Amino acid sequence: MSGMTYKKAGVDIDKADAFVKKIKPLLKKTRRPEVLGKLGGFSGLFMPQIKGKKDPVLVSSTDGVGTKLLLADLLQKYDTVGIDLVAMCVNDVIVTGAEPLFFLDYIACG
């Protein structure tokens, strides 16, 4: 596994950073008072105004399997990829102090 990098796995951090820099002004235009945190965190935080609830905050996070599939291919073991993915998303939520309530799913193609 020596020499493995994000770039070799198809993830270009520099391009991602450049993209975020380009869209930052657009994102700032959509900011609302309920949005907590800053661009670039592991989770999105939103504090809705809900009657009967004191200071509720919704926290969301999404992740991809990424290089986990390379390891799964090497081991020919795929039944744990989804478990690991859920664990990473849960970790990204609980580091904010929030309780995981739901799981977001998506399909990425490219």
Image: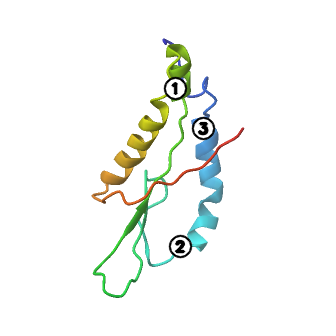
Residue under the point 57% across and 37% down: 13
Residue 9 left/right relative to 102: right
Give the labeled residue for mark 3: 14
Which of pointers 3 and 1 indicates the residue nearer the eye?
1
Amino acid carrying label 3: it is: Asp
Give the labeled residue for mark 2: 31
Point out residue 29 in the picture as x, y percentages from the top left corner.
Answer: 60, 73
Residue under the point 55% across and 33% down: 66
- Number of marks: 3
Point out residue 69 in the picture as x, y percentages from the top left corner.
Answer: 55, 26
Q: Secondary structure at mark 1?
A: loop
Residue under the point 61% across and 23% down: 8
Which of pointers 2 and 1 indicates the residue nearer the eye?
1
47 to 101, vertically: above or below: below
Question: Would you say the residues marked 2 and 1 are in contact, meaning their CB atoms lie under 8 Å apart?
Answer: no
The tag on residue 78 is 1
98 to 82, vertically: above or below: below
Q: Nearer the viewer, residue 28 or 83?
A: 83
